[in-house]
């Protein structure tokens, strides 16, 4: 069956439905300078943990980043950027990271089994998406950063995480949006292949 002519389903008829929530969510890069209530972040993590996970491993771990640690992370990012791109870019990155109202670092527990770890990484990604949808429903934006600095031993040391036991999946920037980007997606017919 040829799917190329398929029309995208309009999501405007069910403003409170899950489909509309998913389609409306955006990655937020600019935030209002207002910290979120800790209770809201904990609530979103409580929702996140209901993500599917094979063998019920519940591999995810969430680290709530306080102001002191946020500043240390921001300086670590700036140092990493300075080595690769110079002082001007480092200063811009530092300012950007320091403006983030709330940060959450998410890891998954390593098992030593490559196939299981692939599943656990995927499950943790699902948990992060659950969290982003819950926050979006509450009027809170999120950016899932996968900055290369997360691979550095200094990053793990800063958070007192053993990289032999856990792997970082992302640094989540959370806050009330100062700006909501507009985005679009390819038509569904461009990404679906109907096999006999």
Image (cartoon, helix red, strand yellow):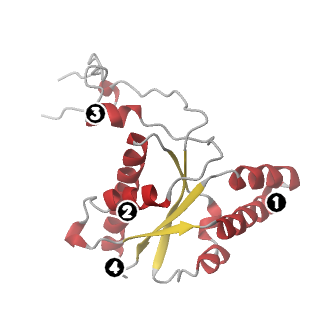
Question: Which residue is farthest left?
Answer: 196
Tag in front: 4 or 1 = 1
Q: Earlier in the sequence, mark 4 or mark 1?
A: 1
Q: Are marks 1 and 3 in contact (CB under 8 Å)?
A: no
Question: Which residue is farthest right?
Answer: 87
**Figure quadrant of the C terminus:** top left
Residue 41 horizontal/vertical position (percent): 45, 58
Q: Position of residue 113 (x, y in %)?
A: 33, 79
Q: Which residue is mark 2?
A: 124
* Residue name at image x 64 percent, y 77 percent: 158
Is disc 3 placed on a helix, strand or loop? helix
The residue beneath circle 1 is: 82
Please indicate whether residue 117 sits to the left or right of residue 172 in the image: left
Q: Secondary structure at mark 2?
A: helix
Question: Which numbered disc flags the more N-terminal residue, 4 or 3?
Answer: 3
Cα–Cα gap, marks 2 and 1: 31 Å
Q: Which residue is mark 3?
A: 19
Give the mark toward the camera: 2 or 3.
3
Q: Residue at image x 24%, y 23%?
A: 3
The reply to whether the C-beta atoms of the residues labelled 4 and 3 are less than 8 Å apart is: no
Give the mark toward the camera: 4 or 3: 3
Which image quarter is the N terminus in? Answer: top left
Which of the 4 image quadrants contains residue 191? Answer: top left
Residue under label 4: 113
Label 4 Cα crowd, 10 Å radius (few <14 / some 14-19 / many 20+): few
Cα gap from disc 4 to disc 3, whole angstroms: 35 Å
Residue at position x 26%, y 64% from top? 53
Give the label, 1 or 3, closer to the camera. 3
The first of marks 2 and 4 along the sequence is: 4
Snapshot quadrant of residue 21: top left
| Label 2 Cα crowd, 10 Å radius (few <14 / some 14-19 / many 20+) | many
Disc 2 to disc 3: CB gap under 8 Å: no
């Amino acid at each position: 069956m040829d799917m190329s002519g398929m029309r995208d389903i309009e999501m405007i008829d069910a403003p409170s439905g899950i489909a509309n929530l998913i389609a409306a969510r955006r990655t937020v890069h600019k935030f209002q300078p207002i910290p979120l209530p800790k209770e809201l972040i904990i609530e979103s993590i409580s929702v996140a943990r209901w993500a599917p996970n094979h063998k019920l491993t519940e591999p995810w771990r969430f680290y709530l980043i306080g102001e002191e640690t946020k500043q240390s992370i921001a300086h670590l990012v700036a140092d990493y950027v300075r080595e690769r791109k110079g002082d001007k870019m480092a200063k811009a990155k530092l300012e950007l990271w320091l403006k983030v109202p709330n940060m959450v670092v998410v890891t998954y527990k390593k098992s030593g089994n490559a196939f299981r770890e692939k599943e656990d990484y995927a499950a943790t990604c699902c948990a992060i998406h659950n969290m982003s949808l819950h926050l979006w429903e509450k009027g809170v934006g999120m950016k899932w950063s996968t900055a290369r600095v997360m691979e550095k031993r200094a990053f793990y040391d800063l958070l007192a995480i053993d990289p032999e036991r856990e792997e970082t999946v992302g640094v989540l920037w959370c806050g009330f949006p100062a700006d909501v980007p507009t985005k679009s997606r390819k038509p569904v017919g461009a990404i679906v292949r109907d096999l006999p």
